[in-house]
Image (cartoon, grey):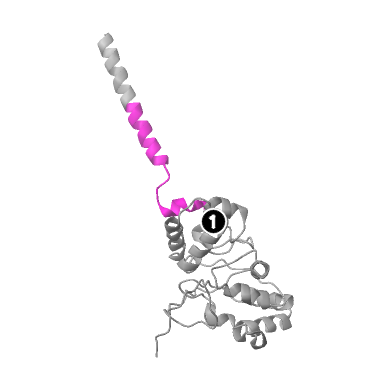
Amino acid sequence: MKILTASIAILLAAQAGAAFAQATAADRIPDTMEARVQACTGCHGAQGRGVENVYFPRLAGKPAGYLYNQLVAFRDGRRKYVPMNYLLAYLPDAYLMRMAEHFAALNPPPLVQPSVSRPASLLAEGRRIVTQGLLGKKIPACITCHGAELGGREPGIPGLLGLRADYVSAQLGAWRFGVRTALAPDCMQYIASSLSEPEVAAVSAYLSSLPVTASRPLRQPGMRLPIACGSQPQKPEASR
């Protein structure tokens, strides 16, 4: 009887152990990049598509090089936002690139931004700066770097569609005052610091007024930009 009882106990324990192992396996989070970046999508939306909060922009579809540069900047303190600085503090370059490539490959439907009323004169001034630049200040048009459709340019220039005016203004202000920096030569710091407050307001208003499209970053290897930019390395021109 004792032997039978012990045998039954062992069998029940084995069955319980197997059931526990199956339950644990079922409850375990899959070890995929999609699962690992849930800390990102909690703020930036499912698949990085963006959210209604003005300061959490869309990540999906932006150039991988741009996203990688921003992750490194947050990790190294060149961009300052405590939750991001803390989240990325100990992640190596290779892993940050994997994160960047993950979001760059996604293309969920864009989040429709609410329409905001702005004076026609402000929008016209913003359009002039975005499409023509400011010749007197040697500031190139935004479209010469960010693309005619403002969808960005590989490998390191982001799209500018689907951003709220307050976010654009905040980022230009951060560059103007050195709170946000990029790889030298920091072209955006030069551009932003050359803009007046009314010009920043105009550019921000115009960009936020544009419809969100599915434009993807341009792929034009070696294209010369109108201004040197460390985030968009250029191949040296062939000697003549």
Instruction: Judge whether 169 appears above or below 220 on screen.
Output: above
Write the residue at 48% across / 63% down.
Answer: 68
The quarter of the image holding the C terminus is bottom left
Task: Indicate the position of residue 92 as horizontal and vertical percent values.
Answer: 45, 54
Q: Residue furthest top?
A: 1
Task: Indicate the position of residue 25 as horizontal and vertical percent values.
Answer: 37, 39
On the image, numbered disc 1 is attached to which residue? 75
Please identify the quarter of the rendering in which residue 142 is found: bottom right
Write the residue at 30% across / 20% down.
Answer: 10
Residue 145 counted in the magenta span = no
Which residues are the magenta region?
15-39
Q: Nearer the viewer, residue 21 or 224?
A: 224
Q: Is residue 8 left or right of residue 108?
A: left
Write the residue at 29% across / 14% down.
Answer: 6
Q: Secondary structure at mark 1?
A: helix
Task: Indicate the position of residue 46 as horizontal and vertical percent values.
Answer: 51, 58
Can residue 196 be seen here? The reply is yes
**Mark 1 Cα shell of 10 Å, populated few (<14), some (14-19), many (≥20):** many
